[in-house]
Image (cartoon, rainbow, N blue to C red):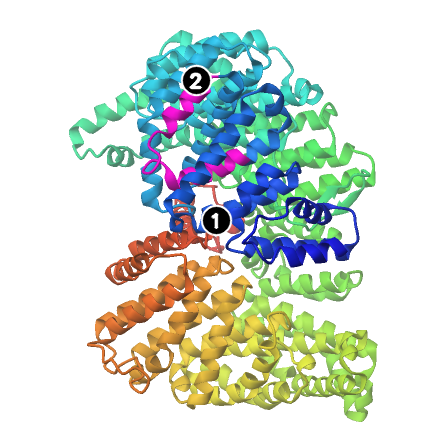
Amino acid sequence: MASLVMAAEKFRDLSQAIDVPLLDATVAAFYGTGSKEERVAADRILQDLQNNPDMWLQVVHILQNTKNLNTKFFALQVLEGVIKYRWNALPVEQRDGMKNYISEVIVQLSSNEASFRMERLYVNKLNVTLVQILKHEWPARWRSFIPDLVAAAKTSETICENCMVILKLLSEEVFDFSRGEMTQQKIKELKQSLNSEFQLIHELCLYVLSASQRTELIRATLSTLHAFLSWIPLGYIFESPLLETLLKFFPMPSYRNLTLQCLTEVAALNFGDFYNIQYVKMYNFFMVQLQAILPLTTNIPEAYANGSSEEQAFIQNLALFFTSFYKSHIQVLESTQENITALLMGLEYLINICYVDDTEVFKVCLDYWNSLVLELFEARHNLDNPAVAVNMMGLQVMPLLHGMVDGLGSQILQRRQLYATPMSKLRMLMICRMAKPEEVLIVEDENGNIVRETMKDNDVLVQYKIMRETLIYLSHLDHEDTEKQMLKKLSKQLSGEDWNWNNLNTLCWAIGSISGSMMEEQENRFLVMVIRDLLNLCEITKGKDNKAVIASNIMYVVGQYPRFLRAHWKFLKTVVNKLFEFMHETHPGVQKCKRKFVIVQVGESEPFVSELLAGLPTTVADLEPHQIHTFYESVGHMIQAESDPQKRDEYLQRLMDLPNQKWAEIIGQARQSVDFLKDQDVIRTVLNIMQTNTSVASALGTYFLSQISLIFLDMLNVYRMYSELISSSIAEGGPYASKTSYVKLLRSVKRETLKLIETFLDKAEDQTQIGKQFVPPMMDPVLGDYARNLPDARESEVLSLFATIINKYKAAMIEDVPRIFEAVFQCTLEMITKNFEDYPEHRLKFFSLLRAIATHCFPALIRLSSEQLKLVMDSIIWAFRHTERNIAETGLNLLVEMLKNFQASEFCNQFYRSYFLTIEQEIFAVLTDTFHKPGFKLHVLVLQHLFCLVESGALTEPLWDAATISYSYPNNAMFVREYTIKLLGTSFPNMTASEVTQFVNGLFESRNDLSAFKNHIRDFLVQSKEFSAQDNKDLYAEEAAAQRERERQRMLSIPGLIAPNEIQDEMLDS
């Protein structure tokens, strides 16, 4: 520890050469196994050194004098910081000195075999550092870099190997990792330089591959080529011996995987038809070699399971090669018989690879199958709608149409016949490997027992969606074959040849997944056969667990086909009665048929729902509470479908009979003695009754009015009483009282009460009298209670309830806003502004309430006093400073609403005089601090609004304070320009004044074009070096969202792609 104290003292002064042994000791203490205190002290010293602006001048001295690898790494880390943030500000001689030193050390260490192998880690780190320098220096200030490098490479094989590593790093930096790291202009410049100087690199690579016998060098060269192939000019690939050279290395085991990766890069290139002949030649030659390495008769899944990691990587690379080649060039193989044979063989390989037990390999293949099947399907789909085909081709000439479509038609049919066999095998593959959809809740655990599972596994779900889509296209291409394959697989289950749980599950998931893709008649016929076979299977299979699996699969399949259930009442009724036997899940498919339950069906004496209500007590006798709530909600859906109001109210009354009796009993007892309500079992019963009411309210909406009116006032009294109980418990027992089970139970009742009111008001149609009837009585019991409570006893649901009320009744609530404000504002702010962590629920709901007020009751905000408005604005700024994404987003959305509303109001000048500069400053702070990237889109919108506003002349009063600024600006735009330049200039001392000025001028110029404005800011964030070396996808989030919406519209146009269960009641029973 003493040496560390001395080190801390000595390292303060860096005007002398640094004491390297002492630095070694400090680094060793940091990585060492000493005490925690030592490590912390060493860490602090190293941090201080790193932050010292003069430390980088010691780097060369340290590298020359230390033998310790960790110390060298530390010195290079210091240097990297300087290169990244301050390089262009350094004097020329310092820059040149550093780059020459690094180059010399690299050459020296890599010129002899022993030092190159021994110092490998160090050399790699030096290479990375050199490439970081190159990003600044080359091409403008280091024109001779590539020629120098190639010349050095020819002097020795080890130098050559290292030069390959440097070239690969450079290519990756420019082409793979540049987005969000460099400005768009710089990326363009580097790409052009690499392209124009590629001739030398190309010659070097070919020279090595033809002349060298050294395995490591050849591997390094292949690896570098792999990085280059995606962007080099095509002539270097197809008009040089490169392809033949690569194919020559392919059969050799030590180069096989690297060569295959290179060939995959070539296969993925797609620039028109110019090189088709070369592609056909390459593919055919490749297939001949592949059969020698891996004969088509090989059992690939087995070979993969028993193979070494190299062999497994080979299968993975093979999948990538085939999928890349076919994606871009499958059509060039459809010409001659010889090519077709090679193509079908390749597809056969790919289907066999799909059976390999490896998720990543399967995903790669699945992705390709999905695109191929879509292509075949669309060609056929357009043929069925000739107008579509013509529009696609831009032809508007009708007489030509028929001849064209016939010609097209025969081509398309030929193409479909060509792929018929692989497609049939692909259907089998999809059925055998079908992923698990989210609805399935019964699975087999690792011990082989049947268990329920409610986890939604995201990866599997994504896979299911792609597989489902692929299977639907396959089904459209050939319904008969799809049906035949599924029934064949099912008959193998019956015969016992293929019977096990997993096989049955995947088969039933597959059958469920194609719902809606067949014509109704064909679908009915197919389903009758499937259900018949499954029922037979249930009969002949022994064992309760087995029967449960089969039964749940039958339920799953019928649940996926609501169209079938609606057409077959007898069957639907059997299903529902079976469901009561299982009673573990309501089926979305059953809810779709709700209208059927309230009609008297043929051969029945009363509607099913009436029959159901008569047997209600026995039906729910054995159920758990959560199952009872689900059951009540389902019956609620049926009642909601009844169109006769009288019958509907009668059904509702019968449905709520049990809970209402219980409620009346409890309230009756409570009137005699309030203490009765304090009993834990009674509280549980009250909670249960509330939950049952909420379930039914969510199904019935407005029609729940008669029931809620019955219990509303008593419910508010219970709410108030429980609230007082909670407050007194917390007051007596301190903060820990809120964690006791008793208080938690009481709070559950309060929350459920609020949830019930919110659900009802939210679902009820816009009837203002409902609002008038229910909102005033809640003001004191709910709002007043919130204000009176201790912070720990306040329910965040109060905030969301009032947000719902304002969103629902909009301007009608303006008069009540001051009251709401008074009750919740100050006291909630005190809870949430102490830090960013406490009361997370209150935070989000508070800002949602504020947003509802700003959107629908803006006049009420204008009437606030300036102190109160300041509180609102401070809380908005507080919100968007949050690192919690949804809170920051709510705050920013709220800010955008406020800015627009104030701009349109008569208080425009007053408001912006007070807040314009504050908002601008705060938005720039979160925009550039790297913790708030997800808010990028909204930050840009706010800034665009501010700059457009100030240029529009809408602000007629000066934004600057004449008392403190003596200079009178000609207009606000000039002032804001100056202010912004000053603000950013002081925030980013590493940027020159001209760069900052250029950026601010650019903001004003591009203010009316959102995408240009956004790109301008993205470039600035890169330039300011705030956003490098991090994940920048959030800066591009908006573009991704637009893409998703286009995809949904496409899916809606193809039958079956969006499952019948997911189409929102558009298929309600007629």
Please name whichever residue, 471 or 657, is drawn nearer the observer in this view of the structure: 471
Provide the residue designation for mark 2. Answer: 205
Picture quadrant of residue 313 = top right
Please name whichever residue, 992 or 876, is drawn nearer the observer in this view of the structure: 992
Check the image and name the residue furthest to the front: 16
Residue 103 image position (x, y, % from top left) = 47, 32
Which three-letter amino acid code belongs to the residue tagged 1? Answer: Val
Quadrant the N terminus occupies: bottom right
Which residue is at 76% across, 79% downward?
735
Q: Is residue 127 magenta?
A: yes
Which three-letter amino acid code belongs to the residue tagged 2? Answer: Cys
Which region shows up in magenta? 126-155
Which residue is at 82% across, 77% downward?
680
The span from disc 1 to disc 2 (Cα, nearest Å) is 33 Å
Q: Secondary structure at mark 1?
A: helix
Residue 95 image position (x, y, % from top left) = 41, 43
Residue 777 visible to the viewer: yes
Q: Are dots 1 and 2 in contact, CB under 8 Å? A: no
- Numbered mark located on residue 82 in the image: 1
Residue 913 image position (x, y, % from top left) = 33, 81
